[in-house]
Image (cartoon, rainbow, N blue to C red):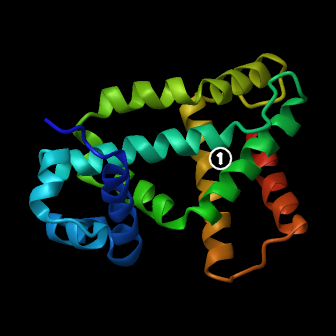
Amino acid sequence: MRPLDPDKRAKILQSVYTLTGRQGLASVNIAGISKTAGIAAGTLYIYFKNKEEVVQLAYAAVEDRMAHAMYSNFDINSPIRQSLKQIYINMLNYRLNNYDETIFIDQYQQSGYIQLNFDKQLAEYEKQNRPLYELLAKGQHEGIIKEVDAIILISFFDGAVRSCATGIIQKLFELNQKVIDDSFDMVWRGMS
C-alpha cells in the first residue's frame, strides 16, 4: 500500500477553510471539498471516512496552528499586561492573515460539530492554551486580573479579538497602532 500524500491531505483541509469562508460551514460538502482540492471524491475517502471526520480534523489542525501563533514571543515572566497584549496582537494578526480559517473556527464553534467530541476538544484546548490559563492565574494571584473563572475571561478576550479583526476586515476602521492600543486597553479594563 502506497503511503498517503500529506500535501493532498493538507489541500483537503484547506478546501474546508476556503469553502467555509466563501459559503459557510453548513454548505460545505464532499463534492465541494473534492472540487476545491482538485481531487476525486473517491480519493478524499482514502484520507477521511466522511465529512464529519474532515471537519473535525480541519478544526484540530487550525486550533494547533492558532495556538502556536498565539504564544509567539510570549514570556510569562514579563509583566502581565504586556504578556496579555502580546497574545492579543498575535491572535489579531492570525485572524487577519488567516481569515478563512478563523471563519471556519467561529462557525465550527457555533455548530453541532463542537458537540461531537466536546470533552476531548475542551481538554485539548486547555492543554494548548496552558500559557494563557497560567498567565490569568498569575494575574489573579497578584490581584491584577478579576477573580472570574478563566474560561469566562478567555471567552471575553477571544470575543474582543474576533470583533476587532472583523471590524478591520470589513473596513469599519483601519489597522494601526492606535486601534490596537485602544482595543486592547478596553479589554484590559474589562479584565483587570
Dot 1, how many residues are within 10 Å of its Cα: few (below 14), some (14-19), or many (20+)? some
Q: Position of residue 73 (x, y in %)?
A: 80, 37
Work out which residue is located at the far top of the displayed protein and give it: 141
Please tell me whether residue 179 is drawn above or below residue 55 in the rendered image: below
Specify whether 138 is left or right of 118: right
Of 176 and 139, nearer the camera is 176
Q: Report if residue 38 is visible in the image.
A: yes
Q: As shown in the figure, which amino acid type bears the numbered disc 1?
A: Phe
Work out which residue is located at the far left of the displayed protein and give it: 42
Please tell me whether residue 49 is drawn above or below residue 14 in the rendered image: above
Q: Residue 60: which quarter of the image? A: top left
Work out which residue is located at the far bottom of the displayed protein and give it: 171
* Residue at disc 1, secondary structure: helix
Q: Position of residue 174 (x, y in %)?
A: 78, 78
Q: Residue at horizontal 60%, vertical 29%? A: 150
Specify whether 24 is left or right of 175: left
Please tell me whether residue 128 is drawn above or below residue 10 in the rendered image: above
Write down the residue under mark 1. 157
Specify whether 173 is left or right of 10: right
Q: Position of residue 49 (x, y in %)?
A: 12, 45
Of 138 and 147, nearer the camera is 138
Specify whether 2 is left or right of 89: left
